[in-house]
């Protein structure tokens, strides 16, 4: 990153502004510079990210779009502190994730990040309420278990699952499972929600319901990244970033 590019960004904050007035460009959530991720498979090295710069601001709903294998999950996992770059820097507010150790990354994830995955990742032996309360029970979160349980119940209620609290995941539809997973992601009151193909396992109508939930959370002020290979989801974002073979495709991004 050069001073020049930083200054030109400062000088023209409207340049990349989009329809949403809620985006706060004075509060940066993520700043990644020169990110490389190379998976060393012994004989073969797979380059998943090539010199990626990435910014996310408070209140943004960013759609990270790209074909399968383009590096979307790799980038999201690095932002979420689940993985580290091979090279480059990544910062969440004042926490330099690329220099954090495993303990610090775990604390970071528990306190600041909510994750939503394509296949929900609910624990089958726990009820929906227990699943949604779980992040607060593993410690390091900002809330006590009793408060978290009430919050989880309230979130599940908000997402139309109030009558499902004592049910196991297998008794729920895909859309209901994903809504339960969103409740779980929110129970520790994260600042940012990272959703990796949240509609990838759902039919179109149910997928749209899940996107409506994410849009509503964004309207209410949450910062959200939605990873998808589905072009139709792009208009949901304030901002769309295209990844292609591990690189940000600026032509496609600006064309949006
Ligand atoms: P996307 O989420 O866009 O489908 P990924 O980030 O999962 O893409 O993967 C990007 C590239 O990195 C792919 O070529 C994939 O095979 C490779 N890759 C991802 N995770 C690993 C891993 N743990 N080990 C080796 N290669 C990986
Ligand atoms: Mg992926």
Image: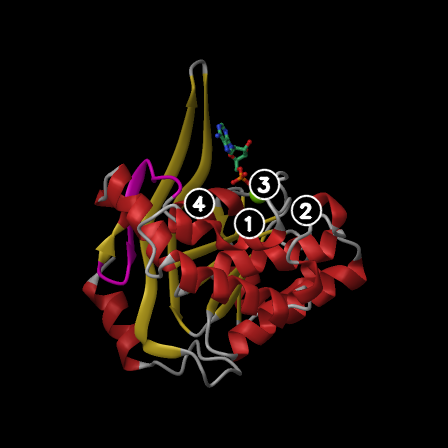
Mark 4 nearby-residue class (10 Å; few <14, some 14–19, many ≥20): some
Q: Residue at (35%, 80%) from the top-left corner?
A: 13
Q: Give the secondary structure at mark 4.
A: helix
Whether tag 4 and tag 3 are in contact, CB under 8 A, the answer is: no
Task: Quickly name the residue at label 2.
Answer: 169
**Residue 25, how many percent across, how many down?**
35, 77
Work out whether residue 231 or residue 212 is closer to the camera in this orientation and state it: 212
Mark 1 nearby-residue class (10 Å; few <14, some 14–19, many ≥20): many
Q: Give the secondary structure at mark 2.
A: helix
What whole-number distance in Å separates the C-alpha atoms at marks 4 and 2?
25 Å
**Residue 234, how many percent across, how many down?**
63, 65
Residue at mark 4: C-beta within 8 A of ligand 1: yes
Residue at mark 1: C-beta within 8 A of ligand 2: no
- Location of the N terminus by quadrant is bottom left
Q: Is residue 154 above or below residue 245?
A: below
Mark sitting earlier along the chain (2/3): 3
Q: Is residue 113 left or right of residue 212?
A: left
Mark sitting earlier along the chain (3/1): 3
Task: Name the mark on residue 123.
Answer: 3
Whether tag 2 and tag 3 are in contact, CB under 8 A, the answer is: yes
Task: Quickly name the residue at label 4.
Answer: 77
Q: Which residues are magenta?
A: 82-94
Mark sitting earlier along the chain (1/2): 1
């Amino acid at each position: 990153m050069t001073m020049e590019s930083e200054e030109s960004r400062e000088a023209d904050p409207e340049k990349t502004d989009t329809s949403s007035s809620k985006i706060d460009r004075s509060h940066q959530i993520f700043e990644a510079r020169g990110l490389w991720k190379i998976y060393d498979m012994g004989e073969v090295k797979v380059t998943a990210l090539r010199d990626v710069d990435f910014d996310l601001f408070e209140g943004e709903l960013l759609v990270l779009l790209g074909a399968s294998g383009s590096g979307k999950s790799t980038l999201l996992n690095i932002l979420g502190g689940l993985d580290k770059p091979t090279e480059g820097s990544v910062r969440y507010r004042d926490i330099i994730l690329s220099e954090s150790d495993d303990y610090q990354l775990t604390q970071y994830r528990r306190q600041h990040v909510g994750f939503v995955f394509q296949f929900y990742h609910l624990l089958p032996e726990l009820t929906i309420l227990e699943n949604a309360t779980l992040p607060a029970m593993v410690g390091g979160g900002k809330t006590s278990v009793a408060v978290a349980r009430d919050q989880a119940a309230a979130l599940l209620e908000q997402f139309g699952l109030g009558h499902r609290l004592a049910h196991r995941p297998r008794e729920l539809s895909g859309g209901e499972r994903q809504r339960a997973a969103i409740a779980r992601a929110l129970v520790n009151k994260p600042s940012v929600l990272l959703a990796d193909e949240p509609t990838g396992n759902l039919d179109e109508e149910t997928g749209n319901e899940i996107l409506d939930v994410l849009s509503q959370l964004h309207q209410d002020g949450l910062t959200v990244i939605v990873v998808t290979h589905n072009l139709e989801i792009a208009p949901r974002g304030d901002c769309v970033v295209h990844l292609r073979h591990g690189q940000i495709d600026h032509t496609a991004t600006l064309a949006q």
